[in-house]
Image (cartoon, helix red, strand yellow):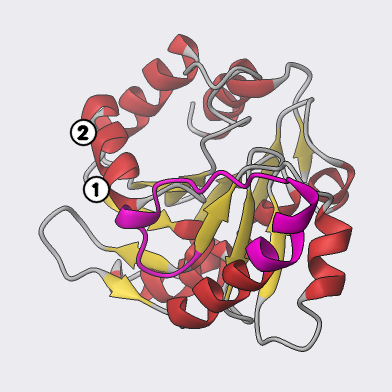
Amino acid sequence: MPKAFVTDIDGTLTDDRRRLSTHAVEEIRRVVDAGIPVVLASGNTLCFIDALSKMIGTEGDVIAENGGVYRRGYTSTNHVDGDRNICLAAYQRIVDTFKPTGEQLQLYSTEYRYSDVAFARDIDVVLIRDLLTDMPVQVIDTGFAIHLQSPGLSKGAALEKLAKLMDLSAGDFLAAGDSINDVSLLSLAGIAVVPANASPEARAVADCIMDRPFGEGMADALVKYFP
């Protein structure tokens, strides 16, 4: 049996409208109550994941901003990687380029982000990547937002660092995710599971593809691997 569980949120613990699965939450609480560490890993802000962790009932081990921020427990130091100033400069280039066309970009929670920049998927991600080829940023399309991030950061890289703080290794984890930004997480974990709605990239590295989609599939996975 795995020693810990790390999971994406949107599309993995939720439905396609970002509503949490009651069954998935119940199973996570069962696992937490059994003494199994649970890490929530998301592209969302730290404060968002903190609130969700509290409501679900985990111990506050989190990975935020697609690996740009991670923390062991609620009261420990926030570890921030990457150069957000470069990400902001890249975002400004996007704004300046598309402003004459009338395109309006919507930033997501910029005042609460420490490492990356996230905005609505209103412009083709291929165009954005082409525009930023000479800048030291990576462009990530999670299916829910587009993120600008320093190269080398990922959920998987953050998991390796966080696992050490937990006296574990990445291979001790059962990992769950549904999208391309979860591939690094799934690849490093001891066991990787994805819901039936997972992207081709996530499915390609999964050890087990659940029969049901979204949070219902992850509830099934927790029953399977933490009986």
Left or right placement of residue 216 versus residue 48 in this view: right
Given residues 95 and 173, the one toward you in this image is: 95
Q: What is the spatial separation of the Cα atoms under label 2 and label 1, in whole angstroms?
A: 7 Å
Residue 84 percent across, percent down from the top left: 45, 76
Give the residue type at disc 1: Gly
For marks 2 and 1 on the same chain, the one whose residue lies earlier in the sequence: 2
Query: How busy is the neighbourhood of tag 1: few (under 14 within 10 Å), some, or many (20 plus)?
Result: many
Q: Secondary structure at mark 1?
A: loop
Residue 204 is one of the magenta-drawn residues: no
Residue wearing tag 2 = 54
Residue 110 is one of the magenta-drawn residues: yes
Q: Secondary structure at mark 2?
A: helix
Query: How busy is the neighbourhood of tag 2: few (under 14 within 10 Å), some, or many (20 plus)?
Result: few
Residue at 47% of width from left, 18% of height from top?
Answer: 20
Note whether 34 is above or below 14 in the view shown: below
- Tell whether label 1 touches label 2 (CB within 8 Å): yes
Residue at 42% of width from left, 52% of height from top?
Answer: 3
Residue at 51% of width from left, 36% of height from top?
Answer: 9
In this rendering, does residue 82 appear at all?
Answer: no
Which segment is the magenta one?
A: 94-116
Residue 70 percent across, percent down from the top left: 35, 65
Note whether 154 is above or below 110 in the view shown: below
Residue wearing tag 1 = 60
In this rendering, does residue 123 appear at all?
Answer: yes
Left or right placement of residue 58 versus residue 87 in this view: left
